Image: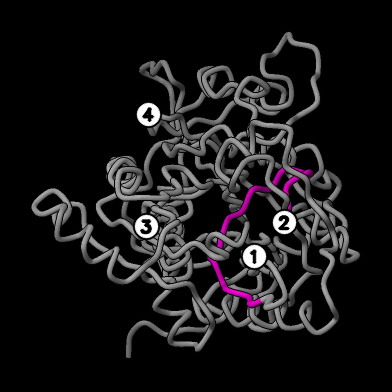
Amino acid sequence: MKKLRIGILFGGRSGEHEVSLLSAASILKAIDRKKYEVVPIGITKQGRWVTADAAELLLANGSAKAEPRPLRAGDPDTTPGAAVLAKGEAVIVPPVPQQASQGALVPFETQASTLTADSARQALQLDIIFPVLHGTFGEDGTIQGLLELAGIAYVGSGVLGSATGMDKDIMKRLFASAKLPITKHVTFLRPEWEKNPRKITTQIEAALKYPVFVKPANLGSSVGISKARDRKELKAAIELAAGFDRKIVVEQGVGGKRGKARELEVAVLGNNAPEASVVGEIVPGKEFYDYEAKYLSEGSVPIIPAKLTKAQSKQIREMAVAAFRACDCAGLARVDFLMEPGTSGRIYLNEINTLPGFTSISMYPKLWEASGLPYSKLIDRLIELARERRAEQDRNRYSL
């Protein structure tokens, strides 16, 4: 039986570049080579697409000569992006228009980085792309649009699901439309803040109580997120978030002065009939689960399964599937919740992540492992779902 040819697409221009390298390294290590022929494809921070024979070794060890070291989620020193991607021997040429029955772009082509008169382009024929691109230009629908035009099957949500899962403002509107409980929030644009910061501050303080969380609307891994306890901290937090996106979301802190909210997570898997994993909990090593607490510090503790009543667990899992459907997701997503401290235990839907961290120690695979689906089998299932989704799309007619 012919092996499926899987392109593992990693790196990218986002601030989560290093996290992407670690996710790709874990997949390359765990994927079943008896079933799949694997092609590592990297994107540098400058946006250059490369493929290299040494990419897997570089991803695993940090350099071709280095001794193997254990991966720690998000540790840039373990898999430095420059070392991984700078040695790409073949540059991937952007697809060009074609006249064909399927897809508007030809398959990816490669050429030698140093061209000669007799060097010829070669098609990089792939059955499925597994994008492990976290954040901007990878999780926001942009790469998904390219793959749709190329007619290539790929793991994860489509253009709409990816875009809505990235934009925290639009995401919340869809959650509200689905009657899912969300925190109070205020959304505004960077030009509005720059034109009249006093007006925006007044609007926020009229709608919300401190502490609040200030977030760029379109970014992942808690990059650019701050907690503000007063007006002075609010200004600094908005200035930080505005450096990352034109749209800023300010959310009411759950729990307020009574204490920290519990941070709960559920992994969802599927296309038309999505399923939810057991519920997990993260106890952050810092005041909240920011980028450093997620990837760089050692203090955060995952608890799987979370200590909840059966009714609470059922409610959260059902809400996770509802959120997945509300955003028109496919393949995979991690859905995050906040639970009020104390006796009320009120649960709020926080956000959905359509391409969550995928190292073997990331929460998404760990939640499925605790639910009875080990890491390598999870990779198999995601590839199956990508093929199913492509087959469903191929049934569509685009002209009379």
**Residue position marked by numbered label 4 in the rendering:** 46
Gap between marks 2 and 4 measured at Cα: 28 Å
Q: Quadrant of the C terminus?
A: bottom left
Which comes before the other along the chain, label 2 or label 4? Answer: 4
- The residue positioned 64% from the left and 24% from the top of the image is 79
The amino acid on which the numbered mark 3 sits, given as a three-letter code, is Ala
The amino acid on which the numbered mark 1 sits, given as a three-letter code, is Leu
Mark 3 vs mark 4, foreground winner is 3
SS category of the residue bearing label 3? loop
- The residue positioned 46% from the left and 40% from the top of the image is 109
Asked whether residue 246 appears in the rendered view, the answer is yes
- Is the residue 126 above or below the residue 265 in the image? above
* Left or right placement of residue 132 versus residue 208 in this view: right
Which comes before the other along the chain, label 3 or label 2? Answer: 3
Gap between marks 1 and 4 measured at Cα: 28 Å
Quarter occupied by residue 115: top left
Residue 359's tag is none
Residue 217's tag is 3
Gap between marks 3 and 4 measured at Cα: 23 Å
The segment highlighted magenta reads 346-364
The amino acid on which the numbered mark 2 sits, given as a three-letter code, is Tyr
**Residue position marked by numbered label 2 in the rendering:** 364
Gap between marks 1 and 3 measured at Cα: 21 Å
* Left or right placement of residue 169 versus residue 370 in this view: left
Q: Residue furthest front?
A: 257
Residue 332's tag is 1
Neighbourhood count class around disc 2 (C-alpha, 10 Å): few under 14, some 14–19, many 20 upward: many
- The residue positioned 55% from the left and 72% from the top of the image is 329
SS category of the residue bearing label 4? loop
Mark 1 vs mark 3, foreground winner is 3
Which comes before the other along the chain, label 2 or label 1? Answer: 1
